[in-house]
Image: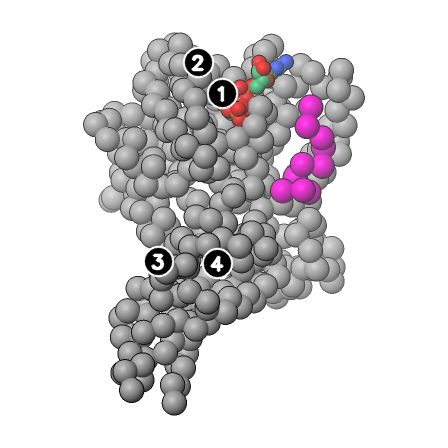
Amino acid sequence: MIEPRILEVRTKILKKNDELARQMRSEFMEAGVLVVNLVSSPGTGKTSLLRETLSRFVDSGSAVAAIVGDLETDNDARRLAESGAPVRQIMTHGCCHLEADMVQEHLDGWQLFGLEYLFIENVGNLVCPTSWDLGESVRVALLSVTEGEDKPLKYPGLFNTSDVAVITKMDLAEACEFDRQSALDNIQAVRPGMQVIETSAKSGSGIEEWIGILRQKRNQLMTTVDSAGS
Amino acid sequence: MHELSIANSLVENAAEHAAQAGAARVTAITLRIGALSCVHESALRFSFELVTKDTLLEGADLKIVEVPVAIFCEECQREVTLPGIQRFRCPVCDTPGADIRQGRELDLESIEVVEQHAEVS
Ligand SMILES: Nc1nc2c(ncn2[C@@H]2O[C@H](COP(=O)(O)OP(=O)(O)OP(=O)(O)O)[C@@H](O)[C@H]2O)c(=O)[nH]1
Ligand SMILES: [Mg+2]
Ligand SMILES: [Zn+2]
């Protein structure tokens, strides 16, 4: 007679990823790097916003770098490299999200000390990236004016784990009859108190504000590191 | 389909625990999946079947316990369970709340194993 036995294991399914991400986060923090994970549907405008962001940081003398995930191509990496910042491509070959070990592998040979900002453009997908911590300090959910004000209600999981929401393509708001108030209400419904920025990579509106928020986040990070060290 | 990655990690985890316990086979596995975890049950079941093939988990019964979202309500000063995931407000007093206490679980709760020595006879 075979008696089955129940083992109470109580572990996180993604514990390997969680542990690696935690370790990476503390390394990033120690090196003073603010890591920003950008997540949205395909085509929301991650690369466009990021390119603009990298250019402005490069122009102002800040040390920035980017890693970009894509299913099959390196188009985004080439577009981002035009900013003059170091950029690396992660080709996921069908995998619909980035995982911590993919990011770690692609950091190989990069000096973290001296770097101020590292951006990670996730694979265009509003569901799959949600559960994978990449060691980031800030997770940003992007939503464009062309894709419907109810996106936050359809994908609460992502918006709920994000720290900042960016509404992109604001230059098209009028043409798309974008209902701004309803979008803002929906974001607040799934993530009360969430910080929201409205941008256009095309006209440049909101980009300075977005950069200001990133600078502020990095200052906060440095303060945390300093007070932990002393 | 990220459920495939989840199923892979799940099997890796469960097999490790089963091996530690000296088990010959895993006959059932219980998960706790939070409402905010973005996992589709049918996709996960499909993936689970796929990745357990030729492992000691093959044929194991997959039990999924769904965990609703609970937030801490500042106003009521207690944890409240939400009926859905689209409105993070206290169902009692309507105060918005972002202090999530449960609902993001992606946990392997327990595994049911059959011992090695029992298999021999
Ligand atoms: N009008 C307008 N178009 C934009 C803006 N930002 C991006 N676009 C356009 O939207 C399309 C997609 O932009 P990307 O920046 O490649 O979007 P993405 O999120 O990186 O896309 P994936 O990496 O494929 O997920 C391109 O044709 C861009 O030119 C904007 O602010 N205004
Ligand atoms: Mg892109
Ligand atoms: Zn309440």
Q: Is mark 2 within 8 Å of ligand 1?
A: yes
Q: CA distance from mark 3 to mark 4?
A: 14 Å
Pointer 3 with pointer 4, Cβ within 8 A: no
* Same chain, labels 1 and 4: no
Comparing labels 1 and 4, the label whose residue is closer to the camera: 4
Q: What's the coloring here?
A: one colour
Do marks 2 and 1 share a chain? yes
The prevailing secondary structure element of the residues shown in magenta is loop
Given the image, what chain letter belongs to the residue carrying mark 1?
A: A
Amino acid type, label 3:
Glu
Residue marked by disc 1: A47
Which chain is home to disc 2?
A
Secondary structure of residue under mark 4: helix
Vertical arrangement, residue B44 with respect to residue A137, above or below: below
Region in magenta: A146-155
> Residue A154 lies in magenta, yes or no?
yes
Q: CA distance from mark 3 to mark 2?
A: 38 Å
Residue assigned mark 3: B12
- At label 1, which amino acid type do we have? Thr
Q: Are marks 1 and 3 on the same chain?
A: no
Q: CA distance from mark 2 to mark 1?
A: 8 Å
Name the quadrant containing residue B120: bottom left
SS at badge 1: helix
